[in-house]
Image (cartoon, grey):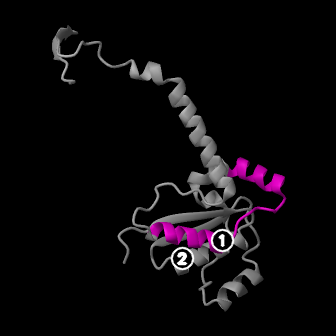
């Protein structure tokens, strides 16, 4: 039994094929290390029969798989407008191979030093790079002001600050 079980939520539009397959694959191949879920922004009539047949042909359990909206996962409710926009602007051409995503997750979890953050796919990686660049720009822009918060004490001197004696311990 693993020390920690990772919860993973796969999001899609109708939650009828790709996300359901990813959920089933990760639960099956993850060997108890993951508890995968799936949901869609709009939900659907149910899992597509072909998706279930593909899973069953590989010996992957399909019992309990169902289409649901991500409203059942309250933490994701605020993402609905952005995901709907993404779906409409991509017109069903979302990138990504669920089997490859699962393989990457398994490799990461099995790594000696698993990542705390793991953007999967070129789009997720590009978004992470943009956020890192923005973070780096903020740090650089505010560097002088933020490091200027140190005490104005000459090395080795004791000064009174707010009525208390403060000894500069830097060497």
| Residue plotted at (51% across, 72% down) | 106
Pick the front one: 71 or 18: 18
| Residue plotted at (36% across, 78% down) | 1
Question: Gap in Å between the C-alphas at discs 1 and 2?
Answer: 12 Å
Location of mark 1 (residue): 98
Q: Quadrant of the C terminus?
A: top left
The answer to which image quadrant residue 157 occupies is: top left
Q: Is residue 13 above or below residue 46?
A: above
Pick the front one: 38 or 166: 166
| Residue plotted at (44% across, 67% down) | 111
| Image-based side of 144 in relation to 41, left or right | left
Query: Residue 96: x percent and y percent?
Result: 70, 66
| Residue plotted at (56% across, 74% down) | 26
Location of mark 2 (residue): 27
Q: Which residues are magenta?
A: 80-109
Neighbourhood count class around disc 2 (C-alpha, 10 Å): few under 14, some 14–19, many 20 upward: many
Pick the front one: 50 or 133: 133
Q: Is residue 6 above or below residue 51?
A: above
| Image-based side of 32 in relation to 160, left or right | right
């Amino acid at each position: 039994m693993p020390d920690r079980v990772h919860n993973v939520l796969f999001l899609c539009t109708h939650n009828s094929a790709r996300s359901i397959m990813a959920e089933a694959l990760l639960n099956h191949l993850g060997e108890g290390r993951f508890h995968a879920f799936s949901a869609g922004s709009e939900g659907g009539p149910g899992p597509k029969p072909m998706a279930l047949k593909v899973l069953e042909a590989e010996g992957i359990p399909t019992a309990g798989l169902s289409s649901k909206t991500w409203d059942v996962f309250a933490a994701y409710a605020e993402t609905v407008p952005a995901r709907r926009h993404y779906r409409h602007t991509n017109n069903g051409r979302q990138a990504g191979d669920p089997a490859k995503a699962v393989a990457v997750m398994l490799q990461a979890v099995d790594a000696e030093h698993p990542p705390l953050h793991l953007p999967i796919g070129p789009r997720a990686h590009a978004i992470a790079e943009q956020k890192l660049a923005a973070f780096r720009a903020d740090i650089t822009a505010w560097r002088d002001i933020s490091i200027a918060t140190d005490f104005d004490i000459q090395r080795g001197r004791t000064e009174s600050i707010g009525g208390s004696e403060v000894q500069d311990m830097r060497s």
